[in-house]
Image (tube, rainbow, N blue to C red):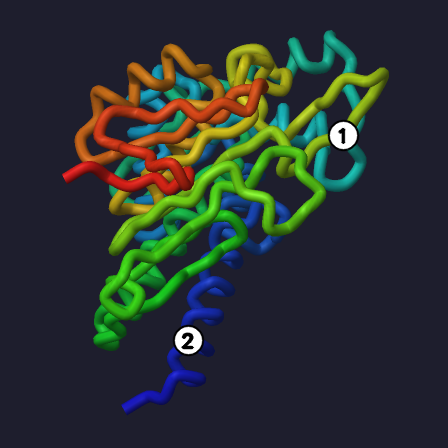
Amino acid sequence: MENESEIAHTCFEICDKYDHLFNKHDKKSEVSKINFQSPDYVDVSKETFDIIRDSKYYSRLSSGSFDITISPIVDLWDINNHPHVPKKKNIAAALKYVNYKNIQLKDSSVKLAKHQEIDLGGIAKGYVADKIKNFLTKKQISSAIINLGGNILVIGDNDKKDFNIGIKKPFSNKNNAYSAKIKIKNKSVVTSGAYERYFKKNNKIYHHILNPKTGYPTDNSLYSVTIISDKSEDGDALSTATFVMGLEKGMSFINHLNHIYAVFITKDYKLHLSDGLIINKNNEISISQ
């Protein structure tokens, strides 16, 4: 039987495996091959096919608020490396290639329209977290926290108690400053926030959650959206989608989905809970039974 260190090592290997498949910056990855060989069909692994198929599903579900073909826009802003405000004409030109409907799936191959590129950054962590959970469950691990940089997925409970997962207070300099804590068992918690990666220019904040329809950072009343769900892949894609939608549309959207919940934080730091969530005087959020 494998010991804990061996199991943990395999979890890291799972992360590496999918990074080599999904990372568009890795020239040998399958996503890079798809991007470089558009508009031809490219044979891919089942995992790459599945995550792109799932991405199309979330795009249809959210009416394009989530769209992996946003890659050219992401590259223009380059917020992770050389953040700057692109020229309007360049954004307009890149937007012509942002349309998830042009992704073609056939058998075990993927095809993009000419000049299209995909970026799985808005869904990959969730997909990988679910894979790690499946592995740990098969190893009969009954209690664990999987943390992939903001994507939290918990297995079981915490010594017969709920796990407490904090929702970070937006733009706080304190590591332990939370707007609320979520009490969960066997759930995923994923947050998308304007405070995660951003830069300032002329006193205006430009963050990394780009609107596929405008090509600019989403500008609405929200600071963050946290999704509580069974699958981390759901949480990853839907936290981005609902952030782009905004409070009113995003809340209505979540309230029409089964077993998926959301906590929205607006720019006045108020918490807005979807149906099925309750909050106590200690700002502890739980799913109502």
Q: Does 105 sit left or right of 37 as displayed?
A: left
Indicate which disc, 1 or 2, sits on the residue closer to the N terminus.
2
Number of the label disc, if any, that sits on residue 62: none
Check disc 1: other Cα within 10 Å, few if <14, some if 14-19, many if 20+. some
What residue appears at the point 59 percent right and 14 percent down from the top-left corner?
219
Give the residue at the far left of this rendering.
289
User: Which residue carries the number 1 mark?
Assistant: 199
Q: Nearer the viewer, residue 276 or 247?
A: 276
> Element type at marker 1?
strand
Q: Nearer the viewer, residue 260 or 276?
A: 276
User: Which residue carries the number 2 mark?
Assistant: 10
Quarter-of-image position of residue 251: top left
Tags 1 and 2 touching, CB below 8 Å: no
In this orientation, does residue 116 appear?
no
**Residue type indicated by callout 1:** Phe
Q: Does 245 sit left or right of 174 as displayed?
A: left
> Element type at marker 2?
helix
On the image, the x and y values in percent for residue 147 come to 46, 58
Q: Does 94 sit left or right of 271 as displayed?
A: right
Q: Does 246 sit left or right of 280 as displayed?
A: right
Judge whether 204 appears above or below 285 on screen.
above
Q: Nearer the viewer, residue 238 or 272?
A: 272
Check disc 2: other Cα within 10 Å, few if <14, some if 14-19, many if 20+. some
On the image, the x and y values in percent for residue 232 come to 35, 46
What residue appears at the point 76 percent right and 30 percent down from the top-left corner?
199
**Residue type indicated by callout 2:** Thr
What residue appears at the point 62 percent right and 20 percent down from the top-left corner?
217
Quadrant of the frame with the C terminus: top left
In this orientation, does residue 35 appear?
yes
Distance of mark 1 from mark 2, alpha carbons? 36 Å
